[in-house]
Image: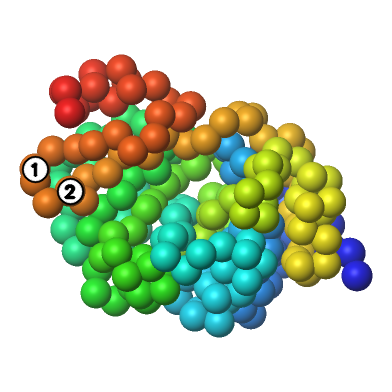
Amino acid sequence: MRPEIIKISSTEPEAALVNYAAEQIRKGQVISVPTDTYYGLAADPFNLRAVERIYEIKERGRHKPLSLILSSADQAEELAAALPDEFYILAEKLWPGPLTIIVKAAPRLPLKVTANTGNIAVRVPATPIALAIAKAAGSPITSTSASLTGMPDCVTAQEVTLQMGDRLGVVVDGGKSPHSAFTTIVSLAENHRGWKLLREGVIPLHEIEDLLGDQ
């Protein structure tokens, strides 16, 4: 059975459609939504059954943590044990945008989401649809790529449907993703002070260094 396709405007998301997508997440479903890089799998990170379903859908190892989409940088304060100054510098200058920041997770966050690492990866994407759905859901949503492990990441709803088949009940179609590249990942969760670039993506290393200095 093919998933339900919901077409939502990428610039002015329709409230009724956004609320419908958010309702599916609140019900414990895993849906696919567009981001500013690739399409992702969105679920409630506090629903352990939904989190487990993500790993099943992707055929992903349980040792790999899930990243979260926030509707605003303020939400990170509820998810992190403590936020260093570097976090606020990056968030102010580069969010919304294709930057994932890893910080120490707060104790309330389920271990399944952190994959027992004690860290959490968060981002505020520059895409109205994902932000609107996260806001309507009333909590952060997961954002791991909507692709099977070892398969190419998807930049359109059609690619998600072809690859995922009947594994998903709902796919939000917001058109082609603006970037066909990964988010840049910066870790602020190292045991020592400072920061570490884990992956250079859409945002180049020199932009991070301009803000935080050398690693």
The amino acid type, in three-letter code, at marker 1 is Arg
Residue 139 x/y as whole percent: 46, 66
Cα separation between marks 2 and 1: 7 Å
Mark 1 crowdedness (10 Å alpha carbons): few <14, some 14-19, many ≥20: few
Residue 105 x/y as whole percent: 26, 64
The amino acid type, in three-letter code, at marker 2 is Glu
Residue 32 vertical position relative to residue 113 in the rendered view, above or below: above
The one of 141 and 59 positioned closer to us in this rendering: 59
The one of 22 and 68 positioned closer to us in this rendering: 68
Q: Is residue 139 visible to the viewer in this orientation of the structure? A: no
Q: Are marks 2 and 1 in contact (CB under 8 Å)?
A: yes
Identify the residue at horizontal 33%, vertical 45% (top origin): 101
Q: Which colour assignment does the render follow?
A: rainbow
Give the labeled residue for mark 1: 193
Identify the residue at horizontal 42%, vertical 65% (top origin): 63
In the image, is 193 to the left or to the right of 158?
Answer: left
Total numbered circles: 2
Mark 2 crowdedness (10 Å alpha carbons): few <14, some 14-19, many ≥20: few
Residue 79 vertical position relative to residue 131 in the rendered view, above or below: below
Residue 91 x/y as whole percent: 31, 39
Residue 155 picture quarter:
top right
Screen quadrant of the N terminus = bottom right
Identify the residue at horizontal 23%, vertical 37% (top origin): 196
Q: Is residue 150 visible to the viewer in this orientation of the structure? A: yes
Identify the residue at horizontal 89%, vertical 64% (top origin): 2
Describe the element under mark 2 as helix, strand or loop: loop
Give the labeled residue for mark 2: 190
Residue 87 x/y as whole percent: 23, 42
